[in-house]
Image (cartoon, rainbow, N blue to C red):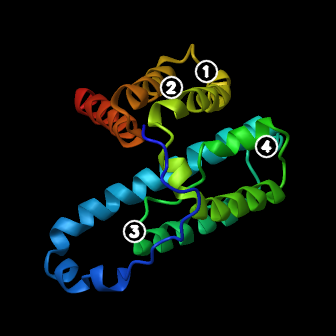
Amino acid sequence: SPLPERIVALPSAHAFWTDLDFVTVGERWQECVPIGLAFLFVCIFDTAGVQFGAGLQAGLLDDEGVLPGTKSAFLGASFATVLGGVLGTSPTIIHNETCAGIAAGGRTGLTALVVAAMFALSVFFVPIFAAVPLTATAPALIVVGAFMMGPAGAMDWDNFKESLPAFLTISVMPLTYSIANGVFALRDLQISRLATHN
């Protein structure tokens, strides 16, 4: 990658309101509803999966295996996703990097606030971060993936009805570079199982 031409740069503001087109969405709602539902389920499964994995890693689950405060986490993620969509970003869910913060000792919301402040500050140093090749982030993502595998140990791997869908979901996601594909593989397996029973 080429070296950055400068170190600090002001973020550019984009008039995103001019890109919103609710008239076309209303006219083509039959096409927009399935797309919206696909985004909805991907965000729900992403948020639920990372939230449970992070809670298990941090030791925050109660005696029944339930993570307290999930409603607030889902509301925060949904609000951030809507705002992020309007601003033109990808869904703002609970990211896997949360597990890296937990591994470093973070157990409260203060960890998230510090990370948010660092992300806000990093906007001004985009030229430096843009010079880092994507392959350089692979080791960090592999370590985060290793942290995320903790909940897999809680699976009942002897129960084939539970272990096969979990295995397919876990293996399809990295092979296709998509969490949605892993979720759809699980869905397709359930559909085929229902078809064979009928």
On-image quarter of the N terminus: top left
Residue indicated by mark 2: 162
Which mark is nearer the camera, 1 or 3? 3
Front: mark 2 or 3: 3
Q: Position of residue 39 (x, y in %)?
A: 37, 58
Q: Amino acid at mark 2?
A: Glu
Circles 2, 1 touching at the beta carbon (< 8 Å) = yes
Q: Residue at x 61, y 68 (%)?
A: 75
How many numbered callouts?
Answer: 4
Marks 2/3: CA–CA distance: 37 Å
Q: Position of residue 30 (x, y in %)?
A: 16, 69
Spatial separation of the CA atoms under disc 4 and disc 1 = 18 Å
Mark seen at residue 61: 4
- The quarter of the image holding the C terminus is top left
Q: Residues within 10 Å of mark 1 (few under 14, many from 20)?
A: few
- For discs 2 and 4, the disc positioned in front in the rendered view: 4
Taking the image as shown, residue 97 lies to the left or right of residue 117, namely left
Q: Secondary structure at mark 2?
A: helix
Of residues 29 and 146, the one drawn nearer to the viewer in this rendering: 146
**Residue at x-position 73% and y-position 46%:** 66
Badge 2 or badge 1: first in the primary sequence:
1
Q: Residue at x 43, y 59 (%)?
A: 90
SS assignment at label 4: loop
The disc, 4 or 3, on the residue closer to the chain's N-terminal end is 4
Where is residue 159? Give x, y as percent: 54, 18
Q: CA distance from mark 1 to mark 3?
A: 40 Å
Marks 4 and 2: in contact by CB < 8 Å?
no
Mark 1 lies on residue: 156
Find residue 88 and name its label: 3
Residue 65 seen anywhere in this rendered image of the structure: no
Quarter of the image holding residue 120? bottom right
